[in-house]
Structure formats: C-alpha cells, structure tokens
C-alpha cells in the first residue's frame, strides 16, 4: 500500500507542479508550493481513484479531481496551523507555513490554493462537459465553505473547553473532515452522471471521513510527534471536543472498528472492483506504527 501511495503521490504532485508552473512569476508561488509539496500520503486522491475504478472513470479525469482536492486540503492545513486557529508550528515534518513565511503570507498562500482547486476544475484541459464542471465546482465549494471545512473549523474552535454531545462532535467532524471525503467519493459519479448511486456514495464518503478523523484523533492521543509529522497530544491540552474526550480511548477504538465494519458492509455489493477502496480503508485504520491499534 505504501508503494501505491508513493506512486500516486508522485503523479499527483507532477500534475500540480506542471499546472502551477504557469504562475512561476507570482510572488506567492513559493509559499503555495511549500504548503503543497511533497504533501501527505494522498489518501484523498487514492479514494478518488478507488471509486473511479468501481465506476470506470478515465484516469485523466480522476487526476484533475485529485489535484483539486489536494489543493483544497493544503489550503485547509495552512489555515488550520495559524496562531488564531490551532497554532501548530509543525506540519508534515517541517515548519508550518506561517513559521516559514509569516502569518499574512501563509493566509494569502492558503487562499490562493483554495482558488487553484477551482481553476483546475474549470480548466480547458479537464475535458468533461461544462455542466459537469459546474456541478463539481458547486459541490467542492460546499465541501470547503460554511457547511464544510470552514464551518467545521469554526465549531472545532467554538467547542474548546466545553462539554459537547456526541451528536454535535460527529456533526463537527463530518464538516471539518467528512465533507471533503464525501467529494472524493461522489465526484467520480458526477462525471459518470450516475445519479442512482450518488446518495449511497455520499454517505459512504462521510463515513470514511469520520473514520479518518477519529483515527487522526487517536494518533494525537497516543501517537508520537516524530512518526506523525506533527505535534501530538495537543487536543487534550487545548480542551478539544473529540469522541475520545467524551467516550474515552477504548470506547473510541471500539466505535472506530464498528464504523469500519459498517463501511465494509456497504462495499460488499461491489466485490472485486472495490478491493482498492477496502485496502485504503484498512490502511487508514492500521495504526500499529502510531501506537494505535484498531
């Protein structure tokens, strides 16, 4: 799985680097690339290709989707690390963008990566119908804004040091993380105009995103800074509202395992064509190297 992710990461980064090369004269291109490359493991991109395989979407089209999602993800991390947000100085094993370039430059670089995502989807090189482009841009906008990443981040900050119900925590994590995973699962179906499966894969994407966030919280709770590539044990210190803070570590592990089995049950109907997606989900939850077992 690691080899597959590295191979995909190389391809997605090549696409993004080539796309951004037309803007090399921009003063913001250096901090943008700093936040974007080499990037994480490209789990979101892998899910796009996994779902694309199930519905036989062209790899070239999937690459545009993956690049746009990675740009959105990089923007969200740059802003998430800011002193006014989570105030993290380390990201992906190196200094956060605001430490390297200053807060104002980091904000502007993040904003530029956000708009780059929509540029990619509207670009003439992305050879799908304009109506499909419009639908994809609309969906990704919702996943990124007040009902998605931005709205989830607001709740995340607002819930600090407060007693919050499980329902509210899940809603927050679905917005903050789940919405972008939802896009990853739905976007290939939008390209194929498959309305019949749209709702089921929307729910699937949310479940995968929630699972990813829970595991991320478990890594923060038990993992080590060096292997995680970011500071750990910060959620507890900041009084973050997480499922762990409400249910405890062991019950959260149990909750994650039940959620994983729920996802696998949904994928049974797709048999061999979903093997890649099942492999990705196993990778998300396999965390022995983080000292977290699910």
Image (cartoon, rainbow, N blue to C red):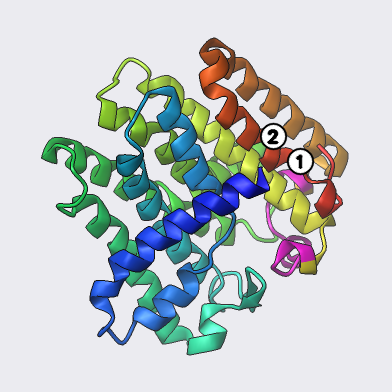
Of residues 207 and 28, the one drawn nearer to the viewer in this rendering: 28
- What residue is drawn where x is 84% and y is 43%? 248
Percent of width and height locating residue 82: 53, 76
Q: Position of residue 8 (x, y in %)?
A: 50, 50
- Looking at the image, residue 123 sits to the left or right of residue 235; the answer is left
Q: Quadrant of residue 259?
A: top right
**What is the total number of numbered labels drawn onto the structure image?**
2
Task: Give 98 or 131, whichever is nearer the viewer.
Answer: 131
Q: Quadrant of the C terminus?
A: top right
Compared to residue 140, the image places residue 79 above or below, namely below
Residue stretch in magenta: 227-244
Q: Of the numbered discs in the image, which one, if any, rests on residue 282?
A: 2
Taking the magenta stretch, the answer to whether it contains residue 79 is no
Q: Please provide percent x and percent y for residue 108.
A: 36, 78
The N terminus, quarter of image: top right
Decide whether residue 230 is among the magenta residues: yes
| Image mark for residue 286 | 1
Residue 269, above or below 218 = above
Q: Residue at left 46%, top 68%?
A: 36
């Amino acid at each position: 799985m690691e080899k597959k992710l590295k191979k995909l990461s190389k391809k997605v980064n090549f696409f993004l680097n080539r796309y951004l090369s037309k803007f090399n004269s921009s003063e913001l291109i250096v901090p943008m690339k700093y936040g974007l490359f080499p990037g994480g493991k490209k789990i979101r991109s892998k899910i796009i290709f996994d779902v694309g395989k199930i519905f036989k979407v062209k790899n070239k089209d999937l690459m545009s989707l993956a690049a746009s999602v990675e740009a959105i993800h990089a923007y969200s991390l740059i802003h998430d690390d800011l002193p006014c947000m989570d105030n993290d100085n380390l990201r992906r094993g190196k200094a956060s963008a605001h430490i390297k370039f200053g807060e104002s430059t980091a904000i502007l670089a993040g904003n530029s990566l956000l708009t780059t995502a929509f540029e990619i989807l509207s670009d003439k090189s992305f050879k799908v119908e304009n109506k499909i482009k419009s639908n994809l841009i609309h969906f990704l906008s919702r996943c990124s804004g007040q009902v998605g990443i931005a709205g989830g981040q607001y709740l995340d900050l607002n819930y600090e040091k407060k007693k919050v119900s499980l329902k509210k925590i899940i809603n927050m994590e679905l917005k903050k993380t789940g919405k972008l995973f939802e896009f990853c699962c739905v976007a290939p179906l939008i390209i194929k105009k498959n309305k019949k499966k749209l709702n089921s894969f929307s729910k699937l994407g949310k479940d995968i995103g929630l699972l990813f966030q829970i595991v991320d919280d478990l890594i923060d709770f038990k993992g080590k800074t060096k292997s995680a590539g970011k500071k750990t044990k910060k959620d507890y210190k900041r009084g973050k509202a997480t499922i762990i803070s409400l249910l405890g570590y062991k019950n959260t592990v149990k909750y994650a395992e039940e959620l994983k089995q729920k996802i696998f049950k949904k994928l049974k109907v797709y048999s061999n064509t979903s093997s890649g997606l099942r492999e990705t989900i196993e990778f998300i939850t396999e965390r022995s190297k983080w000292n977290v077992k699910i």
